[in-house]
């Protein structure tokens, strides 16, 4: 609601060729000035900053309605090559200082740039906030503003839906558990404050402190997993399947360009699931290498197989690696049964020249395209990249771009909650009375509620009455 | 046949805790006021617990006092025990509570009313509030007398169509067997006002001579008396105090209740009204908290004039024979004679979301409502609404700005905002956890928060106002001084630190930093603060709090700033929500029903999302 803050948001849809990040407000020029560098400040590969003094007032000094070419940087590293459009107040959409950053990178890069902006003092724009400012500053009239707001309202509902869906399951119940724990302590403290002749808080200080510390740890763990999860949620969940020793790990390593998975010729050495993130021409793949699927008596491997099946269910895209040197076997039939309703591609591993399997043999059982592939010559890797990219761009593979906004919000909310809980911890350690605890505990409770889309207004009072026998 | 009698500026219906404050406010503001009561002898009667104040309720009493109300002064005159609760906790939750001599309390208030200029007391029942063109023009009594008036304030408490119940016994009376008011509900319904039925209850009163106090724990009052009213000095209020007593229910009590639960009108369905969760009956407690082995029972004197003792914690509507068994199972009450049975009471009240923050009905000009008839519970909640309704009725007639306290200014603001914005499904009780900014809304600074407002309104005289200004000045000067006093690691200081178990100084700090240490205080450092001026106790207390909790107070102040931004965005009364077409349907319906006065209030209505608030803001900027 503060109109003096500088806001940033993604103006383009995701998945297109160019991502546009817009930033508006009195600090726009200053913030982008800090993180932008022209060509001569970056080494020739566009990877590192040169050690030359940069003028943060670059955009302040620059004339309005000009275009700058350069790089967005994060600390000493370079995030992406961009084109920056400068529109100074009042000659902009919002009548404030506006900068648009055109990044040619994919969703990951666009998000990364947004994050850098937020880190440098911008605030994430609320849905419709650019339009609201345009309207408040007299740039557009109400009917225009309302038309835009209407679209935004429906969009934000959708975003909420998808956020809730995304969170159904582990994250939301994880957060809910923490909220309930907080609420219980809140209820207890407030009940005791309200009815001090009945409930006694003495000797509970240490227990409460323990709970708070536990909650801080749990939330911090979540923030770390969120960073992880965010990257994943923007990528295509790609699962590599195939019977033991078909060449899955070798493929993974080729894609990763590093020896991460254990590769041997003993069937069944990939004991667990290996996950990696891979960029193929600006498309992000969350790559999962599964254990080979076959009947096994090895307990450890069995666990891996169970996991593999779960991953297949969740996958956006599957790469099925078959060893072309042997005909289809029972294990292949099992695999095909698991994956036949998914989207994917068959990779015919022809590393061995003694080919016993044709494309036709597979097509009979699984109606997917086949790509010929050889580990030794890396032949086919490029074809695979092209295939995945085209499938994505044609919409055969989809993922939800709305997840992005909500997830940064969630992270911010959890971080806010942690800050509040640290305040509670300090309050307890300072030896302050219990009524000071609840001020920040309630804050943390509300912040976490934002994630699950819940409001707090009557929760505490209801909790007090539900769990504590109050009054005369 | 109806006839028109004398006309008044304001008519107050009911002379309970809300009605008394309302009538005193309008009369003191120079308006000709008539107050109706069903019984002159029951002015400011306390039909339930014999005390005033307690957690968060004590805050309300002090706020009423700071605005120029009477409740604080009246309890100061008539208390027989006083106690500050939560003293081991932070200042925000310190709560003053006093046991009253019920008869004294009632008589003292009656005396004030009787001797207030512009105020006439009349024993009669009002049957109708006369409304013409959506505007109050007068009231009509059951004797068909019409009293024209410019404003009417409904303070009917639990009297509307009241019914008292225990076991199979059901009597259509108000509390304590007083006459119920059986006519006004029909008039409210005819005026299109939504009426609902609430329930509350009270425990038995037993004869003191039949109680074995040796089986109970004595609960004495504080020797250090803190007055409720900021106008009183502790020394002048000293008097002999009486004790309360603590005992407990036990498994046998609970068994008696469970064995007879089918005979409870609460569970048989005979009582349909919604009861308060805060004051559950003992049968409710036993049913809902089955794993609790015992519940507290406080035995409290009803006054010095009587042997009746109030059995706090055991309100009930069980049949008389069960009541006997149940009370007799409690240690110390084995042979107790019950003077009055416990009973539940059902009554009509209005849905408070129909009111503005001034406590005037949104749809009826000049018609105000305050107290239990608004769905609240408690004497203090009633008094708080009473004074606000009285002030606003007066402001309206005098053509002045209404008085609306917001959530950051007073518990009264929280109370009224909760009632009118969120509504309530049970008799609403104040709680400190309902106040978001409670660190600012302390009982110790109610005068600093509200005396100026009381003065602006006209209920606080210049003398009291000037005293307040002087107090403010002293607090400010001393706080500033303390922040600039440097303390070195000198011997006398180290000694005090050691005595209080505080870390010794390595280098110099300010006096303020030392006061902030939990184990120290302004008072404890007096001897090492050489230039400290002589100051009144209440000033010292404020300085201590301001310094000690500065960081927390500042954070709350920042929260308040955020809150005020939306609060100050007013919504025009004639807004057409259909015109704001990007609002979600649910939000639109809620906003149409509640018609909030500000965007802040709108944001607190359940069903109005942050996105709806944004849409509303955009719309308002344009218009």
Image (tube, helix red, strand yellow):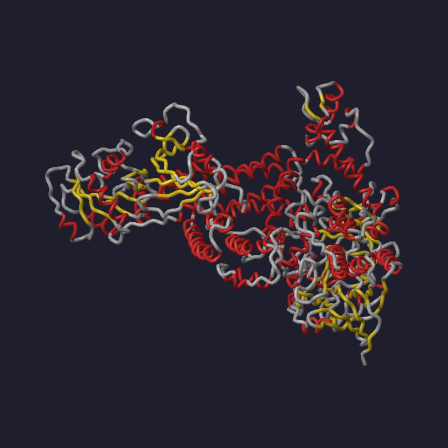
Residue B126 placed where, x, y %? Answer: 78, 71
Q: Residue at x 73, y 34 (%)?
A: B544
Residue B269 placed where, x, y %? Answer: 64, 69
Determine the image quadrant of residue A36.
top left
Question: Seen in the image, is A120 located left or right of residue A458?
Answer: left
Determine the image quadrant of residue B109.
bottom right
Count of residue discs: 0
Residue A301 placed where, x, y %? Answer: 29, 40
- Name the residue nearer the viewer: A332 or A150: A150
- Name the residue nearer the viewer: B351 or A152: A152
Q: Residue at x 85, y 42 (%)?
A: B234
Determine the image quadrant of residue B238.
top right
Image quarter where the C terminus of chain B lies is bottom right
Q: Is residue B245 visible?
A: no
Image quarter where the N terminus of chain B lies is bottom right
Residue A313 placed where, x, y %? Answer: 31, 50
Vertical arrangement, residue B366 with respect to residue B433, above or below: below
Q: Is residue B501 visible?
A: yes
Vertical arrangement, residue A182 with respect to residue B311, above or below: above
Question: Seen in the image, is A443 located left or right of residue B56?
Answer: left
- Name the residue nearer the viewer: A202 or A69: A69
- Name the residue nearer the viewer: B454 or A318: B454
């Amino acid at each position: 609601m503060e109109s003096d803050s500088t806001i940033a948001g993604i103006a383009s849809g995701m998945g297109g060729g160019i991502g546009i990040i817009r930033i508006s407000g009195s600090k726009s020029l200053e913030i982008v000035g800090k993180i932008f560098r022209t060509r001569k400040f970056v080494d020739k590969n566009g990877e590192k900053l040169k050690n030359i003094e940069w003028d943060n007032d670059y955009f302040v000094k620059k004339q309005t309605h000009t275009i700058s070419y350069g790089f967005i940087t994060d600390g000493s590293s370079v995030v992406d090559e961009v084109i920056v459009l400068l529109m100074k107040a009042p000659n902009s959409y919002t009548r404030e200082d506006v900068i648009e950053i055109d990044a040619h990178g994919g969703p990951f890069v666009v998000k990364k740039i947004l994050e850098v902006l937020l880190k440098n003092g911008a605030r994430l724009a609320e849905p419709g906030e650019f339009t609201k400012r345009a309207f408040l500053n007299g740039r557009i009239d109400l009917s225009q503003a309302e038309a835009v707001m209407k679209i935004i309202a429906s969009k934000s509902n959708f975003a909420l839906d998808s956020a809730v869906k995304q969170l159904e399951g582990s994250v939301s119940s994880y957060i809910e558990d923490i909220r309930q724990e907080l609420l219980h302590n809140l209820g207890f403290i407030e009940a005791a404050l309200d009815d001090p002749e009945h409930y006694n808080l003495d000797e509970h200080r240490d227990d409460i402190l323990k709970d708070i510390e536990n909650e801080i740890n749990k939330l911090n763990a979540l923030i770390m997993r969120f960073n992880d999860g965010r990257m994943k949620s923007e990528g295509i969940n790609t699962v590599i399947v195939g019977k033991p020793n078909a060449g899955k790990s070798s493929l993974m390593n080729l894609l990763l360009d590093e020896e991460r998975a254990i590769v041997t010729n003993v069937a069944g050495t990939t004991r667990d699931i290996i996950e990696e993130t891979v960029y193929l021409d600006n498309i992000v793949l969350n790559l999962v290498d599964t254990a080979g699927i076959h009947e096994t008596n090895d307990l450890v491997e069995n666990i891996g197989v169970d996991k593999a099946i779960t991953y297949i269910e969740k996958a956006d895209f599957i790469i099925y690696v078959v060893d072309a040197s042997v005909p289809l076997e029972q294990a292949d039939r099992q695999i095909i049964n698991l994956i036949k309703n998914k989207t994917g591609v068959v990779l015919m591993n022809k590393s061995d020249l003694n080919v016993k399997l044709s494309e036709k043999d597979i097509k009979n059982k699984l109606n997917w395209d086949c790509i010929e592939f050889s580990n030794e010559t890396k032949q086919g890797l490029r074809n695979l990249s092209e295939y995945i990219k085209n499938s994505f761009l044609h919409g055969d593979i989809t993922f939800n771009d709305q997840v992005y906004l909500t997830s940064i919000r969630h992270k911010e909310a959890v971080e806010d909650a942690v800050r509040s809980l640290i305040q509670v911890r300090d309050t307890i350690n300072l030896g302050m009375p219990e009524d000071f605890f609840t001020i920040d505990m309630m804050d943390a409770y509300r912040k976490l509620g934002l994630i699950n889309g819940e409001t707090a207004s009557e929760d505490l009072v209801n909790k007090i009455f539900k769990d504590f026998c109050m009054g005369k | 046949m109806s006839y028109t009698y004398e006309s008044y500026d304001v008519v107050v219906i009911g002379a309970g805790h809300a009605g008394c404050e309302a009538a005193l406010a309008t009369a003191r503001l120079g308006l000709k006021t008539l107050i109706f009561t069903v019984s002159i002898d029951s002015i400011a009667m306390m039909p339930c617990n014999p005390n005033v104040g307690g957690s968060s309720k004590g805050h309300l009493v002090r706020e009423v006092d700071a605005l120029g109300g009477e409740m604080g002064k009246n309890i100061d005159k008539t208390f027989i025990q006083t106690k500050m609760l939560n003293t081991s906790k932070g200042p925000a939750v310190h709560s003053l509570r006093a046991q009253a001599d019920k008869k004294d309390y009632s008589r003292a208030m009656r005396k004030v009313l009787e001797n207030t200029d512009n105020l006439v007391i009349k024993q009669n029942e009002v049957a109708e509030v006369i409304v013409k063109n959506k505007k109050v023009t007068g009231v009509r009594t059951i004797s068909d007398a019409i009293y024209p008036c410019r404003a009417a304030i409904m303070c009917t408490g639990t009297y509307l169509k009241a019914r008292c119940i225990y076991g199979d016994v059901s009597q259509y009376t108000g509390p304590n067997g007083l006459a119920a008011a059986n006519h006004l509900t029909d008039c409210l319904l005819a005026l299109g006002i939504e009426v609902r039925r609430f329930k509350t209850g009270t425990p038995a009163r037993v004869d003191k001579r039949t109680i074995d106090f040796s089986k109970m724990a004595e609960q004495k009052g504080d020797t250090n008396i803190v007055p409720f009213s900021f106008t009183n000095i502790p020394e002048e209020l000293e008097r002999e105090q009486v004790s309360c007593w603590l005992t407990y229910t036990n498994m046998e009590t609970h068994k008696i209740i469970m064995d007879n639960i089918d005979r409870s009108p609460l569970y048989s369905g005979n009582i349909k009204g919604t009861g308060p969760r805060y004051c559950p009956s003992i049968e409710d407690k036993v049913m809902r908290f089955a794993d609790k082995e015992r519940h507290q029972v406080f035995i409290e004197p009803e006054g010095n004039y009587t042997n009746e003792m109030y059995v706090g914690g055991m309100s009930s509507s069980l049949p008389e024979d069960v009541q006997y068994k149940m009370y007799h199972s409690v240690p110390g009450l084995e042979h107790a004679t019950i003077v009055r049975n416990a009973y539940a009471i059902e009554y009509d009240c209005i849905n408070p979301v129909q009111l503005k923050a001034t406590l005037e009905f949104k749809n009826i000009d000049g018609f105000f409502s305050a107290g239990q008839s608004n769905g609240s519970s408690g004497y203090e909640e009633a008094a708080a609404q009473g004074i606000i309704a009285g002030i606003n009725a007066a402001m309206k007639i005098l053509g002045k700005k209404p008085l609306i306290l917001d959530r950051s200014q007073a518990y009264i603001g929280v109370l009224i905002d909760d009632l009118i914005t969120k509504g309530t499904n049970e008799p609403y009780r104040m709680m400190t956890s309902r106040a978001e900014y409670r660190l600012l809304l302390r009982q110790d600074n109610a005068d600093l928060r509200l005396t100026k407002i009381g003065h602006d309104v006209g209920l606080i005289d210049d003398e009291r106002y000037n005293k307040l200004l002087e107090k403010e000045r002293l607090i400010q000067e001393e706080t500033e001084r303390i922040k600039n006093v440097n303390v070195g690691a000198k011997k006398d200081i180290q000694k005090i630190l050691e005595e209080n178990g505080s870390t010794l100084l390595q280098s110099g700090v300010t006096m303020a930093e030392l006061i902030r240490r939990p184990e120290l205080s302004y008072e404890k450092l007096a001897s090492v603060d050489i230039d400290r001026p002589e100051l009144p106790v209440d000033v010292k207390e404020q300085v201590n709090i301001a310094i000690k909790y500065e960081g927390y107070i500042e954070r709350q102040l920042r929260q308040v700033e955020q809150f005020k931004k939306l609060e100050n965005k007013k919504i025009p009364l004639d807004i057409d929500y259909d015109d704001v077409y990007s609002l979600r349907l649910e939000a639109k319906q809620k906003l149409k029903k509640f018609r909030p006065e500000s965007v802040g209030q709108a944001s607190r209505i359940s069903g109005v999302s942050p996105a709806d608030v944004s849409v509303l803001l955009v719309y308002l900027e344009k218009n």
